[in-house]
Image (cartoon, rainbow, N blue to C red):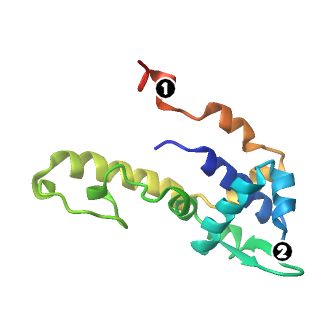
Amino acid sequence: MRLSNTDIYAFKALAFLGMQESTWVHGDSIAEATHVPKPYLVRLLAALAGQGIISAKKGSGGGYALAKAAADIPLSHVLRAIDGPVAALSCASRNWHKTCPEEPRCHARSHIWIRVRDAILAVLEDTSVADLVEDAKIGVDYVHCLEHLLRPTDFGVGKR
């Protein structure tokens, strides 16, 4: 599993919203506080709202807010809202399962890919937006994560 810029931006926006104590926050304020480019942020917030992670309210006094308590939003839900399946292969996916003809006898599926999926999900389900809020409260800025994202070209894949 690799994180993307969008994942990091989502973590920043959610941590910020989680610190706002259930008040509605305008998109401009989120963009300014998180330094996430506004056009990017608008699409990201729409994806999170579409999955019920945040609420959006139009008009005067509107904006964005967490849809529930930060502790009740596991990171597994956030990453699925942004990236889709957590599993590496559709035959090992819980929510986007696609049957493979080799599935009944495939050792790798049952002994590797399902176990990897379950291990990642266990951590992501045990970690919530409240954990991101704790970082934000002490001034941790995930912008530095953007410099450390692993890309295939970083380790020779895709280079010619």
Residue 107 left/right relative to 22: left
Q: Is residue 75 above or below residue 5?
A: below
The residue nearer to you, when weighing 5 against 59, is 59
Residue extending furthest toward the top: 160
Q: Position of residue 17 (x, y in %)?
A: 78, 64
Q: Is residue 61 above or below residue 126?
A: below
Q: Quadrant of the C terminus?
A: top left
Q: Is residue 142 above or below residue 94?
A: above
* Amino acid at the residue labelled 2: Trp
Q: Position of residue 151 (x, y in %)?
A: 52, 32
Q: Position of residue 45 (x, y in %)?
A: 68, 64
Residue under the image location 59 percent in, 58 percent down: 127
Callouts 2 and 1 close, C-beta under 8 Å: no
Q: How many numbered discs sit on the rendered protein?
A: 2
Q: Position of residue 42 (x, y in %)?
A: 71, 62
The residue nearer to you, when weighing 122 against 1, is 1
Residue 24 is marked as 2
The residue nearer to you, when weighing 112 against 5, is 5
Residue 153 is marked as 1
Upstream in the sequence, badge 2 or badge 1? 2
Q: Secondary structure at mark 2?
A: loop
* Amino acid at the residue labelled 1: Thr
